[in-house]
Amino acid sequence: MNKKISTALSALMLILAFTAILGCTNKDEIMKELLSDEQGKYNIHIFVGARGEDVYELGNEFTKVIDSDPEIINKIDQYSIFYKNSPNKKEKNYFKLLPTDKLPCFVVFDTKGIIYYTNEVEDLYKFNDIIKESK
C-alpha cells in the first residue's frame, strides 16, 4: 500500500511540475508578444473595459499625447488597444498577466519588459520625458 501511495504522489508531483513549466513557458510567450522588436523603440498597449465612445475619446487623447512631440512618434514601434470583454483568448490572457485591475491602463514595453505603467492618459507626457532623457 505504501508503494502505491508513493507512486501516486510521485506521479502527482511530476504532473504539477510539468504544469508549472508549461505555465511559465506560456506566460513568457504571451509577454514576448507585447514586447517591442527593436532596441530603442517602444510598444504601448492600452487596456480598456469595453468598446464604446469613451474608448474613441481615450484614443483621441492618447494620439494627442503621442503626437505632441515628433521625436516621440519615431520611438513608438506599435500601439494597440485591448478590450477586457473581447472573446479573443489572447487578449484575455493579457488581462490575466498584467496589472489591469483599474481601467483604462497604459502599459509601455521595451524589448525586455514593462518600463512604464499608468492609468491616466495625461501621465504619458511623463513617459515622453523619460524617452527624451534616455537618449
Image (spheres, rainbow, N blue to C red):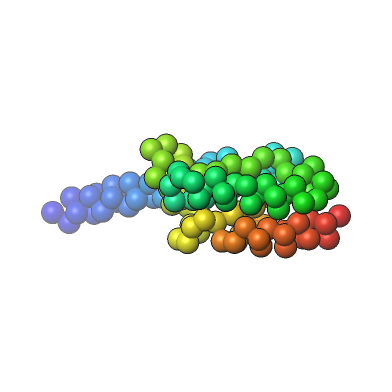
**Can residue 62 be spotted in the picture?**
yes
Say which quarter of the image contains residue 118.
bottom right
Query: In front here: 86 or 93?
Result: 86
Give the camera-side residue of 52 and 72.
Answer: 52
- Return the x and y of residue 105 as percentages of the image width and height: 55, 56
Horizontal and vertical percent position of residue 15: 33, 46
Q: Is residue 120 above or below residue 66?
A: below
Relative image position of residue 7 (x, y in whole percent): 24, 49
Q: Quadrant of the C terminus?
A: bottom right
Quarter where residue 114 is shown:
bottom right
How many numbered dots are placed on residues in this image?
A: 0
- Whether residue 31 is visible, yes or no, is no
Q: Residue furthest right?
A: 135
With 49 as the anchor, is 35 left or right in this view?
Answer: right
Q: Nearer the viewer, residue 127 or 27?
A: 127
Residue at 72% from the left image edge and 59% from the top image edge: 125
Which residue is at the far left?
1
Q: Nearer the viewer, residue 106 or 39?
A: 106
In which image quadrant can residue 35 be found? top right
**Looking at the image, is 119 positioned above or below residue 28?**
below
Residue 77 is situated, as x and y percent measured from the top left of the image, at 71, 40
Furthest toward the top, the residue is 88
Seen at 59% across and 54% down, the residue is: 106
Q: Residue at x 75, y 47 (%)?
A: 67
Residue at 13 percent across and 54 percent down: it is: 1
